[in-house]
Amino acid sequence: MVPKLDDAAEHVVATAAPSNIRWRILMYVTIVQFITYVDRLNLSIAGHYIQDEFGIGTQTMGWVLSAFLVGYALMQIPGGWLGDRFGPRNILTFAIVWWSIFTALTGVIPGFFSKETIHVVWSLMIVRLLVGVGEAASSPNLNKIVSNWIGSAHRGIGSSFTILGIGLGGSITPPLIAWLMRHYGWRTSFVLAGAVGIVVAFVWRSFVTDRPEQHRGVDAAELAALQRARGSSAPLQPNTNGLPWKQLLSNRSVWGLVLGYLCQGFPIYFYHTWFFIYLVRVRGLSVEHGSLWGTTPYIAIAALAPLGGWFSDRAAQRLGKRNGRRLAVWTGMGSSAVLLWLGSHTAAPLLATALLALGAGFNMFAAVTFWATCIDLSPSFTGSVSGLMNTFGNLGGWLSPIVTAYIAVRYGWDKALYCAAAVTLASGLFFSLVQADQTVDGELRRSAEAT
């Protein structure tokens, strides 16, 4: 229950500027998402060296790259549910420490085994699966923080801070990891990334709270502004006996959301896994140039994600949430599909890279709206709905490097990119089922109270 302000607080609200702690909280959200993508992408950069050192083939490397996604996808729903029940701050602190330890072990574990390829492959797959288990809690709980701290009219902008972290992490990781690998070896890069994650966990635990009412830095003016912004959509306290999954899974909007995000995850994971290798082995760039141009999709993401959040909020205000959110997704996914197709047809390597990079940016332009819609549909159970959606998204991501490698080996890389473009269009079509202006919380709450 959100407390009402007394007369003294109302006077402060009328005479003082708000403290704006919420924007600092969103900065920490970006930092956490940043470190998740450093730890997620480092293997795709190191993959070139690992393949050469241990004699791992392209299709086998696809399975290694996908191992992360197995743990990540399977633990999305438990991670989101834990955040709804116990609060995202503590769950994320534990999760950051967990995945940072196993990130460091990625650089250590192969040394305990013989040089036989099969042993190295299985050790890397297991440790990367466990990195994925830890990182699974990140996105649902970061979105839960956005839900608690940002009002209804700015959910697109709020959700864009998580995607901004992806763009910044992806922009910095390729040149940084490539530089570390050249000077200190690929193993050292994983150990250092794990150590940085431990520091991030300490910062997160020290400065972030689950809700504005718990933060000592939030003054009465900001609290009043947040209460007004949340209005009738202020999150209800979830029932600790459990979430009514039957009602949730019978909702058409939820299915449109999760199937659309499954199709969103397939093309974006081409960039997370194969893009650097594609630039080096297919487009003929050197490792140095590949690491530089490998940042361009993430630069595009960092630029276009905030624009996508702003566009989504403005479209929702002008057209209503149902049509506004749909327009934002259609714009992003339609543009991304066209750019993937154009990039696959372009002979000039650098122009093709730029077109493909913009394809990634517009994909995440649309992805912001998916995360904002999780909050629209269920402010009370945002963590659980976000976890469910991201489970499907990462099932698509798990399939992506495997299917991409299969098509590329047998039919060529241009056909693999055609496939990614077609799946991108399907994402927008599935989102057409979503009615973002109709919350499912009322039905869920009544069901939870009846149990």
Image: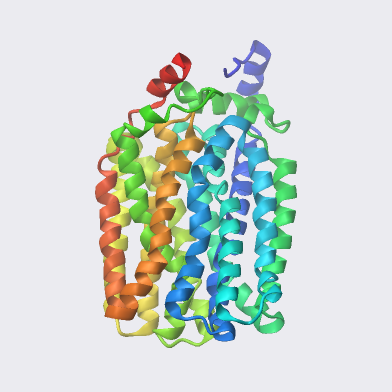
Observer able to see residue 149: no
Residue 394 position (above or below residue 417): above
Residue 192 position (above or below residue 373): below
Left or right of 448 on screen, residue 366: left
Q: Determine the image quadrant of residue 141.
A: top right
Question: Residue 402: horizontal and vertical position, in percent?
Answer: 39, 68
Q: Front-most of 81 and 168?
A: 81
Left or right of 304 on screen, residue 96: right
Report the number of discs. 0
Q: Front-most of 373 and 274?
A: 274
Q: Front-most of 287 and 213?
A: 287
Question: Residue 66: horizontal and vertical position, in percent?
Answer: 47, 64
Question: Residue 407: horizontal and vertical position, in percent?
Answer: 31, 74
Residue depicted at x 33% and y 28%:
438
Question: Residue 386: horizontal and vertical position, in percent?
Answer: 46, 41
Residue 361 position (above or below residue 372): below
Residue 52 position (above or below residue 220): below
Residue depicted at x 67% and y 69%:
190
Q: Front-most of 247 and 332?
A: 247
